[in-house]
């Protein structure tokens, strides 16, 4: 209990407990809908790149690192 109290007081992190994955998903869904409603924003969906060679994968990984990529 002390660790949870420390998270709340020191880091302002709140812990939600749930019985199962359905009960866990509902607050996340609710927060996501609230965040998107009224702002005209939609969830971001990125397509998975079609990388066929090892070199393509290596380039993809290196470019995803901060301050190194060709974006």
Image (cartoon, rainbow, N blue to C red):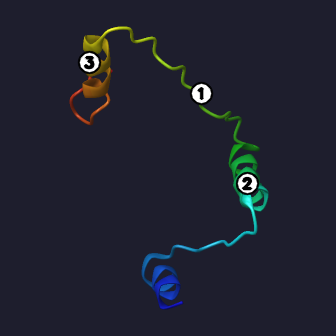
Identified at 66% across, 71% down, the residue is: 16
Please state the horizontal and vertical placement of residue 4, each as a whole percent of the image. Answer: 52, 83
Residue that label 1 marks: 45
Identified at 73% across, 57% down, the residue is: 21
Gap between marks 3 and 2, in whole Å?
A: 35 Å
Identified at 70% across, 41% down, the residue is: 39
Please state the horizontal and vertical placement of residue 6, each as a whole percent of the image. Answer: 45, 85
Please state the horizontal and vertical placement of residue 7, each as a whole percent of the image. Answer: 47, 79
Please state the horizontal and vertical placement of residue 65, each as a whole percent of the image. Answer: 27, 34
Gap between marks 2 and 1, in whole Å?
A: 19 Å
Callout 3: helix, strand or loop? Answer: helix
Q: Quadrant of the C terminus?
A: top left
Residue that label 2 marks: 25
Identified at 30% across, 12% down, the residue is: 56
Residue that label 3 marks: 59
The answer to whether residue 70 is seen in the rendering is no
Crowd class of label 2 (few under 14; some 14 to 19; many from 20; radius 10 Å)? few
State the residue in front, 51 or 42. Answer: 51
Gap between marks 3 and 1, in whole Å?
A: 21 Å
Crowd class of label 1 (few under 14; some 14 to 19; many from 20; radius 10 Å)? few
Callout 2: helix, strand or loop? Answer: helix
Crowd class of label 3 (few under 14; some 14 to 19; many from 20; radius 10 Å)? few
The answer to whether residue 67 is seen in the rendering is yes
Tell me: residue 70, above or below residue 36. Answer: above
Q: Marks 2 and 1: which is nearer the front?
A: 2
- The quadrant in which residue 1 appears is bottom right
Labelled pair 2, 1 in contact (Cβ < 8 Å): no
């Amino acid at each position: 209990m002390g660790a949870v109290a420390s998270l709340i007081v020191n880091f302002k992190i709140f812990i939600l407990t749930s019985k199962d994955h359905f009960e866990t998903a509902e607050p996340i869904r609710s927060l996501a809908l609230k965040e998107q409603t009224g702002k005209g924003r939609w969830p971001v969906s990125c397509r998975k790149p079609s990388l066929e060679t090892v070199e393509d994968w290596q380039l993809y990984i290196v470019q995803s690192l901060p301050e190194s990529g060709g974006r």
